[in-house]
Image: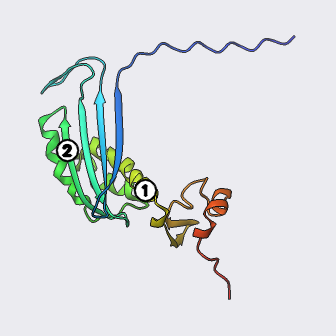
Amino acid sequence: MSSAPASPAPEPTRRPVHLRRIECAGFARDDGLFDIEGTLIDTKPDQLVLPERTVPANAPIHHMTLRMTVGRDFVIHDVLARSVDVPYEVCGHIAPAYRSLIGERIEAGFTQKVKRMFRGVAGCSHLTELLPVMATTAFQIIWSDVDNFDSTAVGNGRTRGSPLGGCHALRLDGEVVLRYFSHMLPPAQTKD
């Protein structure tokens, strides 16, 4: 005797308790550099009473911004961090520490590096959280122009100066690369 399939369990009732919004925007500057602006805003649907302030419902508990200026080589030229809304007045005092990113390069290992640089009391967890998303935004901005690709640097199955080899769809030996970007692959090296 076969039994009928069980009905799916009803969805549990939910109520909103927290909203985090992260937004990144990229801008081409007339000096050839690019600005990436990251914003993080945390809100709650109910009033929140903190020791130094009362936050009305749906008003920002955290509102942090970072502007990072980068070149086509992904080297960071400038950083400006701002704490617009914070739970405690001292939160914004850490913002100048993020200028230590000037001269760093966005590349493999960047996320781990910034987590080490701004670990614990050396940074703000919210500002630091913006950096990985801003780094990927920098790639989206710079690589949106294929003239910025550098197909001469290949390593670990990846063309480091471009998105080629950076994900499943853009595998160097994959259908998309071979169909649309084969002209950007470095010439095959011959064995002597």
Element type where label 1 sits in the image: helix
Q: Name the residue nearer the viewer: 34 or 66.
A: 34
Element type where label 2 sits in the image: strand
- Residue 77 in percent (x, y) is at 26, 63
| Of marks 2 and 1, the one in the foreground | 1
Which amino acid type corresponds to the residue marked 2 in the rendered image? Arg
- Residue 185 in percent (x, y) is at 59, 70
Residue for badge 1: 139
Mark closest to the chain's N terminus, 2 or 1: 2
The quadrant holding residue 23 is top left
Using a 10 Å C-alpha cutoff, classify the residue at mark 2 as few (fewer than 14 neighbours), some (14 to 19) or many (20 or more). Answer: some
- Residue 154 in percent (x, y) is at 54, 71
Residue occupying the point 63% across, 80% down? 189
Residue occupying the point 27% across, 65% down? 103
Q: CA distance from mark 2 to mark 1?
A: 23 Å
Query: Is 64 left, or right, of 187 in this rendering?
Result: left
**Residue 177, which numbered label?**
none
Query: Is 171 left, or right, of 51 in this rendering?
Result: right
Which amino acid type corresponds to the residue marked 1 in the rendered image? Phe
Q: Is residue 29 above or below residue 7?
A: below
The image's colour scheme reads rainbow
Residue occupying the point 40% across, 51% down? 137
Quarter of the image containing the C terminus? bottom right
Residue for badge 2: 82
